[in-house]
Image (spheres, grey):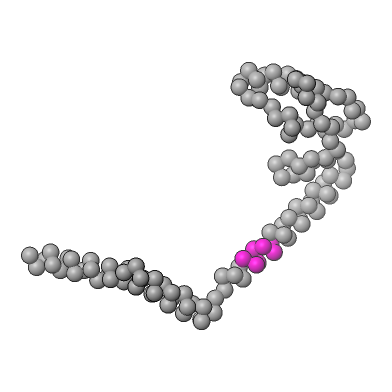
Amino acid sequence: MIEELHTESLKKGLKMNFSKTKLISYKDNKSMINIEGTEIEHVGEYTYLGQKVKVSKENQTTEISRRVKMGWAAFGRLLYEAQTWTFTKINMDKIKKLRELWNDICWASHLKTIKPMKTFVIEQK
């Protein structure tokens, strides 16, 4: 069946990545499968699209505990990032002063007055 998949995918211009192709089976049949001289690896478990696939009854409990751990890790990162955005009044004053300083350096504050002056000059003509 995998050889048919390989030949049909070649007809459509697709190529199988043999280093990422894995074989998992419910039986203990460990027969070797070769495609174009490359042996397909037998594995007991692997991660596919973020989900751990395993041939056993404890697959669901393992997957649920893995996802809970990933959720708690993300929750911790989210809490840490939320704490970095809390500013005190002193920090906000520093940010405002730096913004004003940058505007003075870039003449951005003067641009606000230049535009009304231009319209005033045009209206006077």
Residue 54 place in picture, x, y as percent: 83, 40
**Which region is colored magenta?**
75-81
Q: Residue furthest left?
A: 125
As drawn, is 120 to the left or to the right of 34?
left
The quarter of the picture where residue 6 lies is top right
Q: Nearer the viewer, residue 20 or 3?
A: 20
Chief secondary structure of the magenta portion:
helix
At horizontal 73% and vertical 18% (from top left) the residue drawn is: 4
The quarter of the picture where residue 110 lies is bottom left
Residue 116 place in picture, x, y as percent: 21, 68
At horizontal 12% and vertical 64% (from top left) the residue drawn is: 122
Q: Nearer the viewer, residue 94 or 5?
A: 94
Q: Residue furthest bottom?
A: 90
Figure quadrant of the C terminus? bottom left
At horizontal 39% and vertical 71% (from top left) the residue drawn is: 102
Q: Is residue 41 above or below residue 2?
A: below
Figure quadrant of the N terminus? top right
Residue 8 place in picture, x, y as percent: 67, 19
Q: Is residue 78 magenta?
A: yes
Q: Residue furthest right?
A: 28
Q: Nearer the viewer, residue 4 or 21?
A: 21
